[in-house]
Image: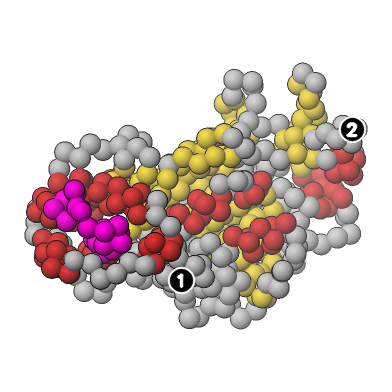
Amino acid sequence: MMPISPLYPEQALALRFISLWKQIAACTSTQRSMAVTPDTVAIADITAALEQDSAQDTLNLISQLLDGNTATPTIVRSNILAIMRTLDEMFYRIRPKGRLAPKSRPYLPAWLKELQGQYSMFGHYANDGDCLLIPRGPLLRIPREENAANAENLADRFAALAVVRLKHNHNGRVISIRHKIIDSSNAHGVASGSTTVGHEKVAFIPIAEDKDHLQATEIQRSEKKFVDFRIDARLNSAERLLAALVQAGRVDIVMAPEMVMSEAQANDLADKLQSHKGPRPRIIIAGSGATESTDEDGLPWNETRIFNGIGHELWRQRKIWTAGLTKTQADKLGLSDIGALKLMNEYNAEDNEIVIVDAGSLGRCVVLICQDLQAEPVSTIISQFQPDWVFTPILDKGIGAGGWVHQRTFSLSGDSQARFLVASSTALAQWLDPTKSVACGFAHGPKAPTATEDKGRLYALANVVEHSSPGYAIITWRSKDGWSSSTLT
């Protein structure tokens, strides 16, 4: 994603917001909190200039107020914050369509229309090579309150704009962010549903339900042992997902778990969805599995494919942090002895990119595959992008209250208004204990929801519906049944 040169005043104005952000972000919270009344005459002039079709007058006025200013640091900081708030209020007029969109159609000066088109085409208003200027999330819900962190937080001062970084670190490795926008069309985007925002119905389809549905193959590379988990070759993942979907009926979101849908099987699913006669969800997070391509060491990536209801691919996400089995875990699965201090890692390469998608009528979405939910930069990324949804396919011995999934989503629930959805197969649980019934679906809400209909940190677990074959489970947001308050400490 190349930064856009400020050839036009509107681009220069959007880039100026990023530069002001960086300047004021370098100050302490206390310094920002001590802001005083700004130069009200100058701010009034800037506000009036923003209503004009050209952004050049606004740029000139900002430069006059800030560049070479000999005022005290407190006054300079106060003026910067006032300018940024004024710009934020203007950009709120072009906030992506959703419940928060203004009911009336406010006047849009030409420069603002240009930047609206810039976002529709590229997914951002400005890119300086280090940061993007994007609409503040979540897109379909009310943003966090200004004091949600119980401390001064620069990002929470703004309702329409967010400055987000394109590079993050994980274990010393650079993880890049790619921000993408898709529309609300039936053909190429996420269609609008009949469901009211906040009442979405989710189907979790484990695909691999029994012990023999999952295969674990040991692979020796150099002095390292790996394990390659795949769906049993006798099963057709696409057919099982669609058969379960027919039973589930009309839902908004479908989620399948990790290691049940290889790239070839996902291609098959896309083809079958085109001719599918049953209900069509708005979005399908089609689990994950091995890619056909490999890295320089010959390892495939662990990749999730995301489709709309007619099989159009919306985006892909590869796992950035592979997991491993301890000796105890390997022993329980009947795998060979790897030694007490070693891990038997999954046989997959690690990718270096996380994709954030503004998915039309569903809002801002991100997929984090299993271990990626625990990755070093995730809290920062969620805090900056403020997604509506976080989707996590996992391979585990099931999902339970108080387990690692619950603990991690509980921890992250204070960072944004995101809804977390986690899907697991039940095959591994059956492998370990055939008598035990475990949940295949999990949902967790935000710590401090801004919607009055919601309570804080609610979670729900979903077991496979009895007698369904292939199995599926259902969670409906804001339903009366199945939700509990998280009491983790």
What residue type is disc 2 on? Gly
Observer-nearest of 129 and 115: 129
Q: Residue at x 23, y 36 (%)?
A: 5
Q: Which mark is residue 147?
A: 1
Observer-nearest of 398 and 89: 89
Name the secondary structure under disc 1: loop
Observer-nearest of 409 and 432: 409
Question: Would you say residue 385 is visible in this rendering?
Answer: yes
Residue 150 appears left or right of 402: left
Residue 470 appears left or right of 435: left
What residue type is disc 1 on? Asn
Could you tell me residue 178's position as x and y percent? 43, 41
Task: Specify the segment rendered in magenta.
Answer: 62-84
**Magenta residue check for 75:** yes
Q: Residues within 10 Å of mark 2 (few under 14, many from 20)?
A: few
Q: Residue at x 26, y 46 (%)?
A: 15
Q: Which mark is residue 339?
A: 2
Quarter-wise, where is residue 481 in the image? bottom right
Secondary structure mostly seen in magenta is helix
Q: Earlier in the sequence, mark 1 or mark 2?
A: 1
